Image: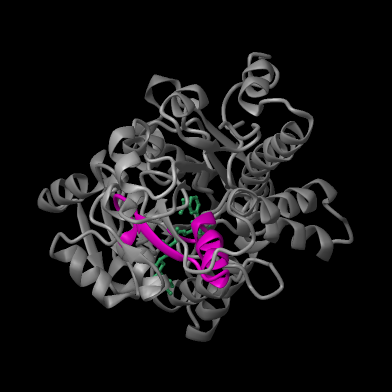
């Protein structure tokens, strides 16, 4: 089998590499010439655990190749995936300009039957727009080529993307022809061993499934953050409440952690997009509007706690920040809560020194020299007034309190991810602010 994947970002590169790893011949396409040149030379554009070795192995075996030419990639291809970005448009809807541009390119160049699959997260109706764009181009060329469209949303999580792709909780595929369904079944067969299911459905339901999944996950987070804020007011502890509710099998203990808000390239934009889809169809998704509101506020809670401790004048104070990426094990800074925090601190006259195991290069690209970067977690503590933890990287979990005490001006920790045990922090003489719990002094 031979497939093409257009868009070599987090989703396209991981999917392409994993398909190649099970013996499929894969061509990855991107318009970014530098990215493709680098990939041909074994340089990986993103940080994703395990990806580099897999890209090298599969490139060496000749199963994984890279090109900037969709035309070239279409040769003998059975399935072509569209995995380009769908960023939010000004009105919150998913901007389909990249997806439809790829569809037009496919229409301009296809000469044999293939299945054209949207893997990007796209609103309901997009597969039909892709189909129309391809048909339009074929008509302009005056040729008739049979093809099918399908929808195959991606559920991988950055930081665990390879494992998620190789051992998926489920694979969702929307099709409108038996031929396409058989092709997709065959393609995914290697991933279905050990009981991982593939769920076939109609295309609109498949497109909607991705938005419903991300909306539900965002809802869990905002729900817990809302409860956490109430816990603080009434004197309860959200970490105990979490354990208490998570042990109910109907609720479950996954993804119910309070924190400093969700970020990333998916939840914020997908929640916005589905709210817009509802509005366009005369329906109001009231729950999701609240989810978005809570999250926007939650990104500011750490600053409120900083003001509670130090007062409103943070002028010339310095804060050490542990973590920058929107979550651990990725260098992705899109919509990261750290960006909101840094912006607020700087506006209030404070300085920020930050350390992140992998995201500093990406942060520097966005923030420039607004922030001073350190080569390790402890370097940024020198002469800082307090430590703020914003991303729960494993290496921050057991800090050396003796070194912290020596380097920090004040023994104060603000923990936006509840990774520390308050008792241990207080035993070490620190003041500890976290989420959904009273301050510990
Ligand atoms: P990304 O920004 O990392 O990568 C997109 C790539 O597409 C870029 O390399 C860009 O150069 C390329 N591109 C744009 N236009 C192109 C064109 N005309 N031809 C060829 N290449 C083109 O994006 P991503 O994070 O991989 O996300 C892709 C899609 O998958 C989005 O719709 C996103 O919502 C969805 N998704 C993302 C994740 C995630 O964790 N990142 C998970 C599931 C789904």
Q: Position of residue 123 (x, y in %)?
A: 66, 59
Horizontal side of 138 relative to 238 (left or right) equals left
Colour mode of the rendering: one colour
Front residue of 53 and 247: 247
Above or below: residue 167 compared with residue 161: above
Above or below: residue 327 compared with residue 237: below
Q: Is residue 124 visible?
A: no
Front residue of 384 and 324: 384
Q: Position of residue 289 (x, y in %)?
A: 78, 53
Q: Write the residue at 72% across / 53% down.
A: 292
Horizontal side of 205 relative to 55 (left or right) equals right
Front residue of 82 and 414: 414
Q: Position of residue 349 (x, y in %)?
A: 52, 71
Residue 359 on the magenta segment: yes
Q: Write the residue at 64% across / 14% down.
A: 247
Quadrant where the C terminus is found in the figure: top right
Q: Count of labels shown?
A: 0
Q: Position of residue 361 (x, y in %)?
A: 30, 64
Residue farthest along the left direction in this orientation: 60
Residue 346 on the magenta segment: yes
Front residue of 245 and 64: 245
Q: Is residue 227 visible?
A: yes
Residue farthest along the bottom direction in this orientation: 140
Q: Write the residue at 71% across / 73% down.
A: 91
Horizontal side of 236 relative to 71 (left or right) equals right
Query: On the rendering, which quadrant does ligand 1 occupy?
Result: bottom left
Q: Which residues are magenta?
A: 333-360
Horizontal side of 42 relative to 75 (left or right) equals left
């Amino acid at each position: 089998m031979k497939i093409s994947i257009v868009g070599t970002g987090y989703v396209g590169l991981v999917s392409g590499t994993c398909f190649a790893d099970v013996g499929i011949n894969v061509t990855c396409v991107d318009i970014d010439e530098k990215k493709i040149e680098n990939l041909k030379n074994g340089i990986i554009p993103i940080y994703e655990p395990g990806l580099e070795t897999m890209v090298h192995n599969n490139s060496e075996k000749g199963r994984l190749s890279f090109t900037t030419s969709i035309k070239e990639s279409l040769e003998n291809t059975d399935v072509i995936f569209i995995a380009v970005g769908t960023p939010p448009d000004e009105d919150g809807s998913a901007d389909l300009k990249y997806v439809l541009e790829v569809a037009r390119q496919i229409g301009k160049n296809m000469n044999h039957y293939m299945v054209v699959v949207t893997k990007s997260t796209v609103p309901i109706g997009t597969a039909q727009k892709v189909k129309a764009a391809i048909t339009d181009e074929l008509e302009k060329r005056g040729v008739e080529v049979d093809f099918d469209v399908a929808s195959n949303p991606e559920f991988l999580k950055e930081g665990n993307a390879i494992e998620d792709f190789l051992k998926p909780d489920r694979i969702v595929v929307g099709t409108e022809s038996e031929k396409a369904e058989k092709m997709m079944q065959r393609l995914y067969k290697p991933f279905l061993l050990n009981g991982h299911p593939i769920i076939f459905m109609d295309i609109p339901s498949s497109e909607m499934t991705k938005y419903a999944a991300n909306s539900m996950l965002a809802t869990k987070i905002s729900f817990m953050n809302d409860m956490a804020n109430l816990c603080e007011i009434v004197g309860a502890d959200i970490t105990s409440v979490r354990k208490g509710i998570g042990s109910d099998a109907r609720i479950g203990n996954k993804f119910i952690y309070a924190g400093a808000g969700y970020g990333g390239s998916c939840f914020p934009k997908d929640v916005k997009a589905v709210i817009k889809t509802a509005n366009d169809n005369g329906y109001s998704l009231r729950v999701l509007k609240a989810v978005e509101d809570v999250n926007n506020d939650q990104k500011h809670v750490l600053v409120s706690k900083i003001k509670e401790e130090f007062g409103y004048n943070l002028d010339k104070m310095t804060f050490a920040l542990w973590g920058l990426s929107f979550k651990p094990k990725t260098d992705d800074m899109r919509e990261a809560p750290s960006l909101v925090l840094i912006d607020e601190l700087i506006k209030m006259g404070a300085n920020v020194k930050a350390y992140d195991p992998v995201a500093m290069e990406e942060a520097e690209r966005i923030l420039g020299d607004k922030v001073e970067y350190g080569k390790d977690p402890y370097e940024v503590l020198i002469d800082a007034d307090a430590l703020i933890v914003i991303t729960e990287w494993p290496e921050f979990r057991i800090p050396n309190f003796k070194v912290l005490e020596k380097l920090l001006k004040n023994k104060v920790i603000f923990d936006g991810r509840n990774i520390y045990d308050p008792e241990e922090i207080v035993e070490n003489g620190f003041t500890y602010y976290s989420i959904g719990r009273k301050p510990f002094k």
